[in-house]
Structures are given as structure tokens and as C-alpha cells.
Amino acid sequence: MKEFSSTDEKIIRATFGILQNEGFTKTTTKKIAAEAGVNEVTIFRNFQNKNNLVEITKEYYLQMLLEKFDEIFDFKDDDEIEGYLQSNFVGLLDLSDNDFSIIKVAMEEVRDIPEKKQLISRITNAVIGKLEEFFKSQIEKGKIRNIDSRVLAAMCFSITFQSIILWRVYDKNPSVEANQYADRFLDILYNGIKV
């Protein structure tokens, strides 16, 4: 990850705080300067303009989040499917509020600047790619039947994303505990829906 001066880091942290509370359109360099305790000229000197600062800020926080996702969805050659998927749920549950704020900013971005390459698609692609890699290895080992690993990865991601991430980002309390939900999901995944 790129190194920033302490002043630039203060500006980046302030930018992120305002982005998560007010969204892109209400984030101004004047507000950022006040929050960071710097002169607005410093922002323009170090980052050129608001759009550039926002992009640098999003990239900075996205890289931190992607590193955590890489740890959560990383796997060893001898990992069993059930244990791996269960650890994904637990790893996501253990993410900090700040990590979930990054996801929330990414989701809010969809409304504010839809024409840009969005953070949410980068998060999605990183996680689905890791899951797909895991399922391909399980197919090669004969642990699961030969199915489309990308579809299975997308399905697992969507269940995980919907259930855990959206609960945390939008403060929706699930009607069951997350571990119980994970167990039920894994049961359906392994045993199907047919009687």
C-alpha cells in the first residue's frame, strides 16, 4: 500500500469520515479541511482536487478491506468445504465497524457516481474469485461433483453478502443467529432441497 505523510493520512481519514456520513455529493474540500485541521490549500496542493482525493481515499480503504477479505477467503490445500465456508461466515462477522463502513461507502457510491468503476464490483470480484479458486480445487480433488465453480462461488458470495454484510451495514438484525444461519445455509448447500 502506498505510504502517505501524516498530513495526507489525516486528510484521507477526514475524507472517508465525511463520505460515509454525507455521501459524495455533500463531501466538500472545505468540510474535509475543517475535519482534518488543515488549510483547504493543502488539500489542493497534495491532491489537486476533490475527485482525485476521493478516489485516493476510496482506493486506500479498499486496499485495506481487500487484504482482510484475502485473509478471510484464503484457504489451505487441506481445508474441508464445510470448515472453509463456516470460517468465511465467522471472518465476516469479525470485521470491524470501520470495515463495514468501507462497504457502506462502496454501496452508496452506486447511487452517487454510477458511471465510475465502482468499489462494490471490485470487492465482489475479489471475493468471488477466491471462492471460485477454492471450489475448483475441491472439484479437482473429487470432493464435490463437477459443477460450474463460478456459479457456486457467486451463490455462496450472495448468501454471505446478503446475510452478514447487509445486516451489519444497514443495522438489520437477523431473525436467527449468524452461526445458526450459516449451519442452515450449509445444510441446504450440501443436501439440496429435494426430499
Image (cartoon, rainbow, N blue to C red):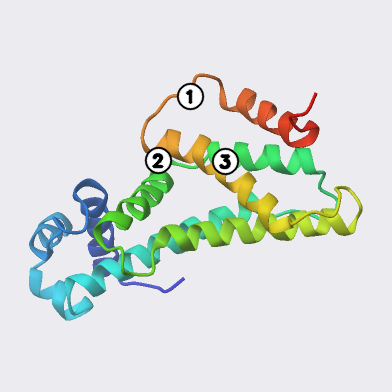
- Please, which residue is most extreme toward the top here? 175
The x and y percentages for residue 123 are 49, 58
- Please, which residue is most extreme toward the front here? 194
Question: Which residue is found at the position 15% from the left and 54% from the top?
Answer: 35
Q: Earlier in the sequence, mark 2 or mark 3?
A: 2
Name the element at disc 1: loop
Mark 3 — residue? 160
Q: Earlier in the sequence, mark 3 or mark 1?
A: 3
Q: Judge from the rendering whether residue 117 lies leftward or rightward of residue 158; answer left or right.
A: left
**Nearer to us in this view, 15 or 177:** 177
Mark 1 — residue? 174
Instruction: Determine crowd level at label 1: few under 14, some 14-19, many 20+ residues with C-alpha closer than 10 A.
Output: few
Question: Which residue is found at the position 14% from the left and 77% from the top?
Answer: 44
Closer to the eye: label 2 or 3: 3
Name the element at disc 3: helix
Name the element at disc 2: helix
Q: Judge from the rendering whether residue 132 lies leftward or rightward of residue 53; answer left or right.
A: right
Kind of residue sitting beneath label 2: Asp
What is the distance, in whole Å, between disc 2 and disc 3 at their CAs? 17 Å
Kind of residue sitting beneath label 3: Thr
Kind of residue sitting beneath label 1: Pro
Mark 2 — residue? 97
**Nearer to us in this view, 93 or 180:** 180
**Nearer to us in this view, 193 or 131:** 193
Q: Judge from the rendering whether residue 164 lies leftward or rightward of residue 46; answer left or right.
A: right
- Please tell me in which quadrant of the rendered image residue 187 appears: top right
